[in-house]
Image (cartoon, grey):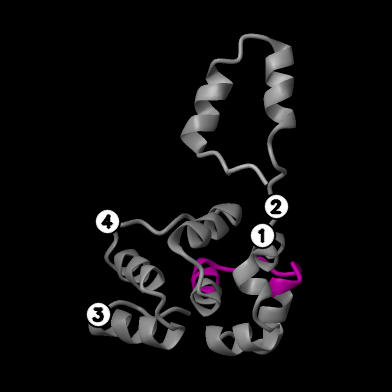
Amino acid sequence: MPPIKKTEELMNVLVSADSEPELHDYLGGLDPLPADFAAYFTALPKVQARSKNELIRESGLDRTYAYHILNGSRKPSRDKIVALSLAAGLDLTETQRGLELTHEGILYAKNRRDAVLIYAVKNQLSVMAANELLAQFGEAPLA
């Protein structure tokens, strides 16, 4: 498997394309992106390594609602994505990608609540520990 190129590297290749054949070659080399959060999330190795029941329990989400999110029939809110990401032990890049796919907005370091959530994801805290930390700093828990 070839190494994954960074977005900046891909942008440099794309900007330097001077002809349609070069554009065609560039597009042919791109891996298809998952269409939605459910496809992305369930394809991650960290998610596949755990049972759905375990992920749902650790996320603190309602079981039925979580199954709807995981099978793609419901679009998750920002907090639900963060809760599932924490439960799965995803890193910050993986969590941010999930947020991007749902157009919910990535975690923003200048926002107090988001800063606490970034810390929680980076340090692989549980959802419960993240909520306790949010409360400690006077921020709303993950809903």
Q: How many marks?
A: 4
- 3 or 4: mark nearer the eye: 4
Q: SS of the residue at dot 2?
A: loop
Q: On the image, which quarter does residue 81 sit in?
A: bottom right
The reply to whether discs 1 and 4 touch (Cβ–Cβ < 8 Å) is no
- The amino acid type of the residue labelled 4 equals Lys
Horizontal and vertical percent position of residue 83: 51, 76
In the rendered structure, find residue 40 and report the number of the disc placed on it: 1
Of label 2 and label 3, which has the lower sequence position?
A: 2
Read off the residue under disc 4.
Answer: 110
Read off the residue under disc 2.
Answer: 34
Residue at the spot x=37%, y=68% of the render?
A: 122
Q: CA distance from mark 2 to mark 1?
A: 5 Å
- 1 or 4: mark nearer the eye: 1
Q: SS of the residue at dot 3?
A: loop
Q: CA distance from mark 1 to mark 4?
A: 27 Å
Residue 8's place in the image compared with 59, above or below, is above
